Image: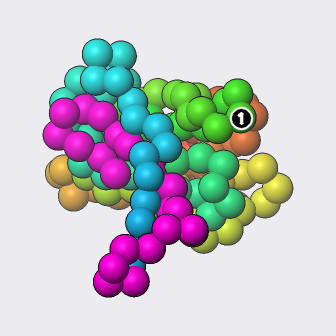
């Protein structure tokens, strides 16, 4: 989940515990710290890669954060990109474009949508190859 306090939180479904109404329960797995946040304004959107290796955050500050798992269970910023307009929507493609290449759609407050590619292990976004 993402929040107006510039933080995100990851929850994990607890398979062993159910509530009295038979709905699943979740426990907090990790929460970012507001004082050390990549974002300095409200985080409006997030999305997961299909394989769970990455998640994205985007917000009013026009920042896109790409988060990756490090040291086992912990997540840390892998890449930070700043744009001209606030980031209002993010979506990973449902599969890899090719090995190690993720496609991302980024929506902005002015109505623009940009497609970019995340190159695994290179910590960079690049323009979509139109060939």
Name the one closer to the observer, 52 or 96: 52
Q: Is 44 left, or right, of 95 in this rendering?
A: left
| Location of residue 52 in the rendering, given as x and y in whole percent from the top left corner | 63, 55
Q: Which residue is at the far front?
A: 20
Quarter that holds the C terminus:
bottom right
Indicate whether 105 appears above or below 69.
below
Residue 33 seen in render: yes
Residue, x 59% and y 47% (percent of image)? Answer: 54
| Location of residue 86 in the rendering, given as x and y in whole percent from the top left corner | 23, 41
Label 1 sits on residue: 72
Q: Which residue is at the far right?
A: 99
Name the one closer to the observer, 33 or 53: 33
Q: Is 71 left, or right, of 42 in this rendering?
A: right
| Location of residue 76 in the rendering, given as x and y in whole percent from the top left corner | 55, 28
Residue, x 57% and y 68% (percent of image)? Answer: 16
Q: Which residue is at the far bottom?
A: 21
Q: Secondary structure at mark 1?
A: loop
In the image, the segment drawn in magenta is 1-22
Name the one closer to the observer, 15 or 70: 15
Indicate whether 103 appears above or below 65.
below
| Location of residue 19 in the rendering, given as x and y in whole percent from the top left corner | 37, 74
């Amino acid at each position: 989940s993402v929040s107006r306090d510039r933080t995100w939180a990851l929850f994990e479904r607890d398979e062993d515990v159910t509530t009295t109404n038979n709905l699943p329960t979740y426990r907090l797995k990790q929460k970012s710290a507001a004082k050390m946040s990549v974002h300095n304004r409200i985080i409006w959107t997030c999305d997961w890669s299909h394989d769970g290796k990455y998640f994205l955050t985007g917000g009013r500050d026009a920042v896109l954060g790409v988060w990756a798992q490090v040291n086992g269970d912990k997540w840390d910023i892998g890449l930070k990109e700043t744009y001209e307009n606030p980031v209002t929507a993010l979506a990973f493609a449902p599969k890899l474009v090719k090995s190690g290449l993720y496609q991302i759609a980024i929506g902005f407050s002015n109505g623009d949508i940009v497609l970019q590619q995340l190159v695994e292990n290179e910590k960079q976004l690049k323009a979509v190859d139109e060939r």
